[in-house]
Amino acid sequence: MARRYLRSWASVVGFLCVFSWIMPPTIAAATDPQTKPRLLVLTDIGGDPDDQQSMIRLLVHSNEFELEGLVASASGTPNELKERVTKPQLIREQIEAYAIVFSNLKKHAAGFPSPDSLLEIVKSGNPNRGRDFIGEGHDTEGSRWIIACTDKADPRPLNITIWGGQTDLAQALWRVRKDRGNSGFQDFQSRIRVFDIDDQDKIHDWLFAEFPDVFYVLSKAPLGTDKREGAYRGMYLGGDQSLTSLAWLDEHVRKNHGPLGALYPSKTWTAPNPNSALKEGDTPSWFFFYPNGLSDPAHPEWGGWGGRYVHEKDGLFRDAKDSVNKVTEARATVWRWRDAFQNSFAARMDWCVADNFAKANHPPLAVLATDRSTSILEWSVKSGNTVTLSSVGSSDPDGNDIRTDWFVYREAGTCQEQVALESRGEHVAIFTAPQVSQPATVHVVLKVTDDGQPPLTGYRRAVIEVQP
């Protein structure tokens, strides 16, 4: 990993830190700010309408990704529907609505994919599901597309989100191992990252036994607990649930926001959902890869809009727990960010109908240590050093006023000692590196929020390793 050096000159405004010792710290970019994450979606669209909800949100955030596949897997959860079917037509219906607002979206941000390019990546998977439908004779358009996308000559990993069942992914893995042998499979699996919502096809135990080294985040409540304790359900359970109400959806999404918003379903099926409106249980899967300056997919334990996950064994990560407002649960790793991600959704739905940049709000730019990217900065300090964090240069594209907030994301770090941040003016915060007996990390998150409507937030994170 390339490193660049930052000199410890207290007189230079905007530098990240000031030390009482002579050696300068080192800073490294943990993520590449120059490239978009590659994303392939497997969706059981056609059952509980929450998949349609998640797809609409993804489409209005699609400029932040390189979308490579929208694969309709077996519709619904097992035994939810009377027929075994895939419904790619529902994806196409949403893309057709997206096409109508596409010209407006482009006026607010660069990089939105053309409707035609999205239609080209809609594929159909296996209408059947489970272990009995993996093996010879079970290749599908969807499983072949997963292989083709993974095989592209691209240094970036292919991020695969599973909103429904894993059968098509499992078939792709099985096919590659059979055709290419172990060495070919090892190369293939090193190119993918998987985020699975709830092991819907009930084959994860087999998958993990067969392919233990695949980078695999499984968001699911632990065996023997209430299934609604899974981290991904923080999308609609816990926290401020007024932001998931039908009234909120009608105001910010469904009414007066164009044909795409009009397609957003108003009712979902899973109880207990106090509002029975917004659910989007699959959205955290792609939030996990969303490049907003808060998280790094290579480190599920760091957390972000898609939740936080701990390493269990081999390539597997499972739900972690955060403590927020005296509540400790896995869902809190998602709902703690709800105000920000709901405001982002609301703003982008405004873009769908605002035919001029000046008619809508846009996210502020969060600058950390003069770095204007979305990279997470990693650096090292000695116990007892004074660390100064600077957000000088942060700004808002609409000319709105911005507010700077800092907080220590305690659960994401390994430092057990209390770290107290002290504000020093509008753009500076300081803390003293705690005394440690072995290297430990402190995660400091910068939030820059504008006063537009709705207020939007930009993030940056510093991961500071404290040395004894």
Image: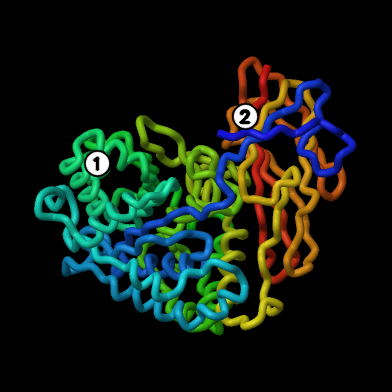
Residue at image position (52%, 51%) is 334
Name the foreground residue: 48 vs 203. 203
Is 445 placed above or below 47 here?
A: above
Mark 2 residue crowding within 10 angstroms, few (<14) / some (14–19) / many (20+)? many
Kindly report the distance in space between the C-alpha atoms of the residues bearing marks 2 and 1: 33 Å
Nearest the viewer among 372 and 168 is 372
Give the mark count.
2
Secondary structure of residue under mark 1: helix
| Label 2 element class | strand
Residue 183 placement, left or right of 360:
left
The residue type indicated by label 1 comes to: Leu
> x, y (%) of residue 265?
41, 75
Please identify the quarter of the rendering in which residue 137 is found.
bottom left
- Tell me if 468 is positioned left or right of 427 in this view: left
In this view, which residue lies farthest toward the right? 11
438 over 410 or under it: above or below? above
Query: As rendered, which of 249 and 394 lies closer to the eye?
Result: 394
- The residue type indicated by label 2 comes to Thr
Mark identifier at residue 441: 2
The x, y position of residue 173, in whole percent, is 24, 45
Residue shown at 57% from the left, 64% from the top: 342
**Mark 1 — residue?**
207
Q: Are marks 2 and 1 in contact (CB under 8 Å)?
A: no
Place of residue 449 in the rendered image (x, y in percent of width and height, measured from the top left): 72, 58
State the image coordinates of residue 367 (x, y, percent, origin top left): 72, 50
Is any atom of residue 252 visible in this view? no
Q: Give the answer, above or below, for where 258 lies relative to 327.
A: below
Residue 357 shows up from this direction: yes
Q: Please give the name of the residue rendered at 46% of the width and 36% of the height, measured from the top-left corner.
A: 310
Where the N terminus falls, by quadrant?
top right
The residue that appears at 43% across and 46% down in the rendered structure is: 155
